[in-house]
Structures are given as C-alpha cells and as structure tokens.
Image (cartoon, rainbow, N blue to C red):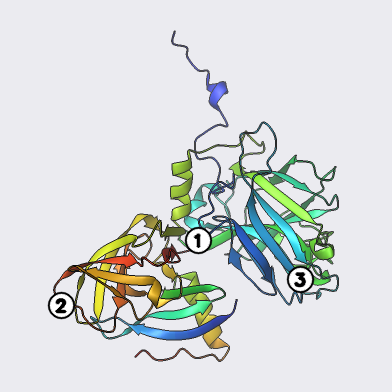
C-alpha cells in the first residue's frame, strides 16, 4: 500500500510528535504513533525502506 | 403452556458461537463498491473482510461489491461479490491474493490452541462462482507461523452451495492473549507457483508457502469471472450449525470495534462539540460508540475546506484537514478520541464551538479505524 505526504503532528500540550498526517492508498488520514495501530506499523515499515516523515510545522 | 426444553435441543446453538464478524455481509460502512484493486493493494471492503495481495500482480485488478445475490431461503440479504476487473494470465510465481478476516488472539483463547485440550473447529459458508475449478482456503496462525490449508470446488457454475470445512485442533503454538492479530482465514482467489507447488496442509504444520493454495484456480483469467460469499460461520466443534443471525445493531457494534464511520447526512452536519484554544485552532473530544481495539486512525475526506467550525453565530472554514490529538483514552480499548481543527484566523479563545461539515457539499466524514 502506497504511503504519501507523511508529516508529523505535535501534541500541543507536550509539544512532542504524537501522530502522522498522511495518505495511505486512497485514504487521507491522521495516524496515532501507537505501536498497536496497524496503520502506524505500516508507516514504520515504510520508513525502514528509507522513506522519511516530514517534521511538524 | 410452558414446556421444558431438553438439553439436547439447545446443544450446539450457544449464542455468539460464530467467531466470524459480519459473516452475513450486512455491514459495509466504507461503501458498497471497491473498484479495481490491484498490485499490492490491501484494502478493507465490507466490514471485517479485507482484500490482500502479496507480490507483484502486474495489471491484474479485482472489484469487490456488497451484493444482493444470496442463497434462497437462508435469511441472507447481502453477499460479498468479487469480479475480475483486469485480466492477467502471467502473474509472478511469488504472488497470492485473497479475501481475509483476521482475529484478535484474546478472542480465541477458548480454542485452547497449543495445549492438549485444543479444540477442533468448523468453518461453513455459502459460495457461488461461474468457475467450477478448485478454490483454496488458508488458515494462518500468525503468532506461531503455522498453517492449515484445504480446498473446495463448486459442483455447478453460478449456483449457491454451502461448504463445510473441518479445521483440526492444533496442540502446538498458543495464541497470544492480546489485541493484536493472531489468526486469519484466507479465501484465496489467485496463487502463483511458489504459493501452490507443495501439498495442502490437512493437518497443522509450520507455515510453508508452497502449501498455501495448491490447485488454486486463477480468478484473473477472465473479466467474466465472479465469486460470491455469504453466511460465513466459524465455530468450535466438528459440525456446522445453522448460521447465527445476529440483530443488525449487534452486528454493527461488533464491526465498530475495528471501524466506525460518521458520514455527512446533509449540509452543516454536526460532528462534535469542543472549545476554541486560540485564534486559529479548536479542539473537541468525540466519544466512540464502542471501545475500539486500539487508538484509532482518523480517516477524513482529505480536503480542509470540507470541514468548518461553528462559533458564536459564525461558521469559519478550516484551512487544514482534521488532526488527531493523542493520547486518547484507553490504548487497548479506546473509548474516545481528541480532534483538532485549524482555521486561518477569526476564532476567540475560550469560546465553545461545534465541528461541522460545510453547507456546500456532503463529502465530509469522520471515520476511525483500528483494524487488525
């Protein structure tokens, strides 16, 4: 499944990266950085292949 | 008159005996048509039933729809229909494609898998196809990389038939007692030679790729090919009981553990109430209708302008797509999610607000996904 336009989202209370905005296939989504979330697992595999998540604004 | 029901009259008919969710294909929150899926696509279709492709499928494409063609007299009204959208007769050896449902390990502990008390199970389903060749099923224990596989063959083309598959007990390999995927049942529709050059695993064995789909018909051989399935039931024991028809609301709630979708019903659909925390941002908490498997992904339309914030007497369109605020409540059984919407200017910190769609269209939606 193709992943595009991945960009971190910071939690405003902690100012830490907490989610990833991206497109997964035809889905537009915001994925929590939770290890049990299977979309996040797919993003981590995508990163392992050399892809990069853009830093949050 | 009150009659005592003999024990024999209720055995084998316990409630919630069907470990398959949405086996009657009633629920399809993502829509009713999933067109031209191909070349590596993994996509959820009707609720709890996904389409998976492993390997390079080239031009081959499949379309899955929720259909009303069902076996007569069984009480079903919906089926899952697959059609070959694009033919490919030279698919790579390492490929396999299938419809599948996955299961949390914590929901299968009563199978006692990996112990001397392991239970045998029975999978039953109604199926029809224009093809009368061999179709295969792979049952995969993902925790222990073990498998069982078998085949079924429609006797007559274009005719609904009920198939019953006995799955033996497996005394090796306990399933993890958690909310991750431990087990899956795959209805194969295509397999390259590397996935079919062994022997079907009639007893549980260490997963061998060549044993997954021996004899599998190539569903991608013609755009005339179709395959329907409904009435899927998987239960403990060696006999297939009648399909357990659940009330629609119960069926929907079971699906919502993995996917929950709110669609715009009309212009200015109200989704959630929240508060404004700056001139450009507002946050809200949405309570989920059932505890979801894990902290969910938010799916949205992908267009910022499909969403807006209603504050005071004003509606201000968003300038970015909805964002998740985490942590949400409950890592393993998420019960609520935090959302943030942004606008370019014009909000007043401290005011209450409502998250809306827009009046111009009904493209907007919020969906929450925690699939396996």
Q: Which numbered circle lies on residue B176?
A: 1
Q: Residue at x 39, y 58 (%)?
A: B266
Q: Chain of mark 3?
A: B
Relative height, residue B85 to residue A30 (above, below):
above
Which quadrant of the rendered structure holds the N terminus of chain B? top left
Could you tell which of marks 3 and 2 lies nearer the N-terminus?
3
- Is residue B171 in sight in this rendering? yes
Q: CA distance from mark 1 to mark 3?
A: 36 Å
Secondary structure of residue under mark 1: loop
Say yes or no: labels 2 and 1 on the same chain. yes
Residue placed under numbered mark 2 in the picture: B349
Residue placed under numbered mark 3 in the picture: B60
Q: Hey, which quadrant is residue B275 in on the image? A: bottom left
Q: Mark 1 or mark 3: which is in front?
A: 3
Relative height, residue B273 to residue A46 (above, below):
above
Q: Chain of mark 2?
A: B
Which of the pair B210/B81 is nearer the observer? B81
Secondary structure of residue under mark 3: loop
Q: Mark 3 or mark 2: which is in front?
A: 2
Mark 1 neighbour class, 10 Å CA radius: few under 14, some 14 to 19, many 20 or more: many
């Amino acid at each position: 499944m193709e992943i595009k336009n991945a960009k971190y989202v910071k939690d405003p209370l902690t100012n830490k990266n907490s989610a990833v905005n991206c497109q997964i296939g035809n889905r537009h989504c915001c994925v929590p950085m939770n290890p049990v979330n299977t979309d996040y697992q797919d993003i981590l595999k995508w990163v392992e292949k050399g892809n990069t998540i853009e830093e949050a604004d | 008159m009150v009659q005592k029901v003999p024990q024999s009259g209720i055995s084998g008919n316990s409630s919630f005996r069907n470990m398959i969710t949405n086996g009657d294909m009633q629920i399809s929150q993502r829509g009713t048509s999933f067109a031209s899926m191909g070349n590596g696509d993994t996509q959820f279709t009707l609720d709890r039933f996904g389409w998976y492709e492993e390997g390079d499928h080239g031009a081959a494409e499949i379309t899955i729809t929720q259909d009303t063609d069902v076996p007569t007299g069984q009480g079903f009204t919906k089926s899952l229909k697959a059609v070959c959208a694009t033919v490919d007769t030279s698919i790579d050896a390492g490929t396999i494609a299938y419809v599948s449902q996955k299961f949390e390990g914590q929901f299968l502990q009563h199978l006692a898998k990996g112990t001397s008390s392991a239970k045998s199970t029975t999978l039953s389903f109604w199926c029809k196809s224009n093809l009368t060749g061999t179709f295969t099923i792979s049952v995969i224990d993902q925790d222990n990389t073990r498998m069982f596989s078998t085949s079924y063959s429609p006797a007559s083309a274009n005719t609904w038939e009920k198939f019953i598959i006995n799955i033996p007990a497996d005394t090796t390999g306990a399933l993890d007692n958690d909310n991750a995927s431990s087990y899956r049942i795959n209805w194969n529709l295509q397999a390259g030679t590397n996935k079919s050059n062994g022997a079907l695993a009639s007893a549980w064995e260490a997963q061998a790729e060549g044993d997954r789909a021996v004899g599998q018909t190539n569903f991608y051989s013609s755009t005339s090919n179709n395959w329907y399935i409904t009435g899927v039931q998987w239960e403990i024991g060696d006999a297939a009981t009648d399909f357990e028809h659940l009330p629609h609301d119960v069926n929907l709630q079971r699906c919502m553990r993995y996917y929950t979708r709110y669609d715009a019903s009309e212009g200015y659909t109200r989704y959630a109430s929240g508060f404004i925390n700056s001139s450009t941002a507002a946050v809200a908490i949405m309570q989920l209708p059932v505890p979801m498997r894990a902290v969910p992904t938010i799916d949205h339309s992908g267009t910022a302008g499909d969403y807006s914030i209603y504050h005071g007497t004003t509606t201000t369109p968003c300038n970015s797509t909805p964002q998740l605020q985490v942590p949400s409540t409950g890592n393993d059984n998420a019960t609520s999610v935090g959302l943030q919407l942004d606008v370019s200017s014009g909000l007043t910190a401290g005011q209450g607000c409502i998250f809306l769609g827009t009046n111009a269209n009904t493209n907007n939606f919020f969906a929450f996904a925690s699939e396996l």
